[in-house]
Amino acid sequence: MSVSHKSVGFQARKSTAGVAGGKPDAEHPVGEPLARVDGPLKVRGKARFAAEFALENLTYAALSYSTIAKGRIASINADEAKAAPGVLLVLTHENVSRLSPPPLFPEGAAGSTLPVMQDASIHWNGEPVALVIAESQEQADRAARLIRVTYEPEIAAIEFETVRAKAKAPKNILGEPTCIAIGDAEAALAQAPVRIDNIYRTPRHNHCAIELHALTAAWEGDALTVHDSTQMVHLTQKTLAKVFGVAEQKVRVLAPFVGGAFGNKSIWNHQILAIAAARMVGRPVRLVLSREGVFRETGGRTLTEQRVALGANADGTLAALIHTGIAGMTAHNDCPEQFTFPARHLYAAQTFLLSQKVAELNIVANTFMRAPGEAVGTFALECAMDELAEALNLDPIELRRLLEPDKDPVSGLPFSQRSLIEAYRRGAERFGWQNRSPVPGARSEGEWLIGQGVATATYPYHRFPGGVAKIRLSADGQATVQMGVHEMGMGTATVQAQYAAELLALPVECVTFEYGDSSLPSGVVAGGSCQSASIIAAVNAACEALFDELLKLVGHKSPLTGLIRTDVEAYRGGIRHRRDTDRFQSYVAILNQAGKDVLECEAPASEPSEAKRYSMHSYGAQFCEVRVNTVTGETRVSRWLASFDTGRILNARTAASQFRGGIIMGIGLALTEETFFDERTGRIMNPSLAEYHVPVHLDVPQIEVMWNGSPDPQSPYGVRGIGEIGITGAGAAIANAIYNATGRRIRELPITLDRLL
Amino acid sequence: MHFNVNGRDHEVEPDSRTSLLDLLREHLRLTGTKKGCDQGACGACTVLVDGVRINSCLALAVQYQDRAITTVEGLEADSGLHALQQAFIAHDGFQCGYCTPGQVCSAIGMAKELERGIPSALTEDLCAMSMAWTRDEIRERMSGNLCRCGAYNGIVTAIETTFAGESAR
Ligand code: FES
Ligand code: FES
């Protein structure tokens, strides 16, 4: 049973429909636009990030990176570096201790299973080949530049064109089947009266969290403390324990604040090398990757080449839906960029062929980046839908209405909750979609062509197993909820304080949420938009345990004497009988009477079985308007409205920001972002924020977001997670708007000026 | 060497290569000023020197002896948070909070530039004595401060409500 809050008598409120804004409601903190609890710390610069912990005797590290993509180190000359002022250690494969290879996500936190600097072999251009430890950062940086490395290069697989021919189907795609074939889709396509069949390409991306990857690490005997910029404290703890051969309890990982992550903040070589070096020099180490280092040594989103073919009957229904393609990957990771996933759930069709392959490259292991798969998969699929709508002479929203399935089109499972068409209707009304001309190039102002586009956003519901929460109730009426989860900007501490306040019927000021520390009860990774539901499930379980304990404590003369958990509900700082509501006692009174200062209860979340029984996904409709300059080819996004169907919303303010943040990354994906890769050398050519173009202030219009807030009946408290859906559909909405503005259909991202001229 | 940060005097002997950013973060333990690139591309390290905004990662510390350096830690008055800091909270002008000190310092420097009539790429009348506080002017002038979390809408609103109202009064 997943909706365990019911058993502690929680009165689930109907929904939290809204738009950004609104007034706080003290009795029901959930859904309210509460300001972030950590806001004052953040605006004062007092939130402490991983590189900001001061330690006695601290040393500084710098890395040196390989300049070939494959081969061996022939020689390393570190003499000059070792002799440079302040240098304490130059760590290379020649003197590094034996380290076990780090376990790959999800067993561990590593982005790749490759052993770290254990021999002379080189696996990608940018792999760390040496680490310098010095008394100051300046000394370490200088010495790293003095290391002379010669290589014996081998022929590397770096050209996509060459490896694509050898692309193979992985055993599975993140546990899902690699290929789904229902009926003979190719035959159905060939016979369909209306056909769309195109190739779409998306490039490499980098997460570009503004906080550089950083750690401050210290050994004390065989005990290790690491302040790491990570979105997975417990998996990092487990991974480091394994790599360094120490017990997990000996490793403590802290990440109270993380300056953005988006999938990128896991274990890469740098933490392992810095921690190994700290052990060798017997002093604490700080390592902050350079921005170039982030591009060289941590993975980004991989490139994809996708085919979408749609065969439509004369009435607009789909005879065939084909989505296939290839993503680049390495032999040492498992991140196939699941771009065929949206097509597995979005549309009804008579036949399906959905399958994807991976082509092995000698590159830094690609990794999960905000809505891996869905972000780029919806670009291809939703552009194709727009193309089909035009071919059928249908409004694109009308086409989605025609193709709306009544159950999951591939698995046949019922939807737990789905109001995509309603989201379209509400969004279209607010955006003024009916005023759009379907004829490309119909609107212009001076040298600007104006167009509007729409696309579906979708992201699956995930709840990760293994989460445990602890609730501590104290006799002064305060509650603390603890779980080793993360705050990278999502608002976790704020919304979870709100949730616990509502669950315990306490004022939100009386609840603190503690997180970001591996010494807390086991958390889940901050990924897959899973934290909210995963935390809530664990907090629900802890709350049940707490109520059981409280009812045991009430003794013989309490109004609650003789009651069990299912008889009662939380009410105004205490517990009351569900029907006989005068039977009430406050938590404070119960604890005082029992002579207890605190009561602590810990419990694991229920098994996340709901997603096995239901097709659980979030949805949205992205509407945008662009202006394309006929002289320069420049595209400006001038309006945006997104209408979401993403389950219950816990905080209107932080939710709006999450949605906007995803959409803005989608604007970058559509128009400016690309990690340039030199296919001759395998080297990333723009490893800086000056040359990798993330959206800046002027690129971003006011973004309107709205949601229906309909609780998902199958998920804990009806939430489905919202961190990733904003980026999905955004690329296609822009490409479709550009088509509407110019009549130019661009099927390759990013849609830069040159592609439009 | 003598440095004045947030009205307080410090005697430090930094390496001649030490950036003003690293002086603040590593020597003075004022970690409110952030490092996002160390290359002048993100604005996270923005501080005010004699009221003018600069990227402290591109500044050598030794060149800033005896200048009035203001960091995010120096914005609070006895009465509490700076109005702009409050507005950032009110309008959710951040998510992770990492770019925030830079955004806040940059906006304060930018407000002065606007007041002084310094034009931007969007300003139409280059000779105008006073500049209009439009959202696009704010966006243009703040475009050197990246926010990967995408809190841009809230940041612009926070700046607009703090300064546009002020200049109208
Ligand atoms: S750290 Fe100075 S501009 Fe990025
Ligand atoms: S709030 Fe995270 S980068 Fe701006």
Image: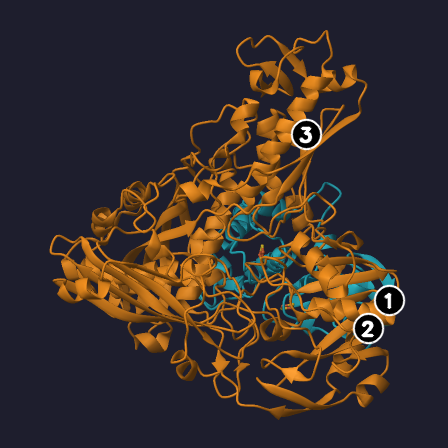
Chain colours: A orange, B cyan
Q: Is residue A139 above or below residue A236?
A: below
Q: The residue under label 1 is which amino acid type?
A: Arg
- Quadrant where ligand 2 appears: bottom right
Which quadrant would residue A352 be assigned to in this image? bottom left
The amino acid marked with disc number 2 is Ser
Task: Determine whether label 1 and label 3 are within 8 Å by CB.
Answer: no
In percent of width and height, residue A103 lies at: 64, 63
Q: Is residue A505 left or right of residue A702?
A: right
Q: Is residue A165 above or below residue A396?
A: below
Q: Quadrant of residue A118?
A: bottom right
C-alpha distance separating marks 2 and 1: 13 Å
Residue picked out by circle 2 = A136
Q: For this rendering, which residue is in front, A58 or A414?
A: A414
Disc 1 versus disc 3: nearer the observer: 1
Residue A526 location (% of width, % of height)? 58, 51
Disc 3: host chain: A
Q: Amino acid at mark 3?
A: Cys
Query: Which of these two is toward me, A226 or B35?
Result: A226
Point out residue A442 in the picture as x, y percentages from the top left corner.
19, 62
Q: Earlier in the sequence, mark 3 or mark 2?
A: 2
Query: Residue B1 vs residue B149: left or right?
Result: right
Above or below, comparing residue A44 to residue A557 in the picture:
below
Instruction: Check if mark 2 and mark 1 are on a common chain.
Output: yes
Going from N to C along the chain, the mark reached first, 2 or 1, is 2
The chain to which mark 1 is attached is A
Q: Which residue is mark 1?
A: A283
**Residue drawn at x 58%, y 80% as measured from the top left:** A124
Report the front residue among A680 and A313: A313
Q: Which residue is mark 3?
A: A510
Query: What residue do we see at 31% from left, 64% from top?
Result: A323
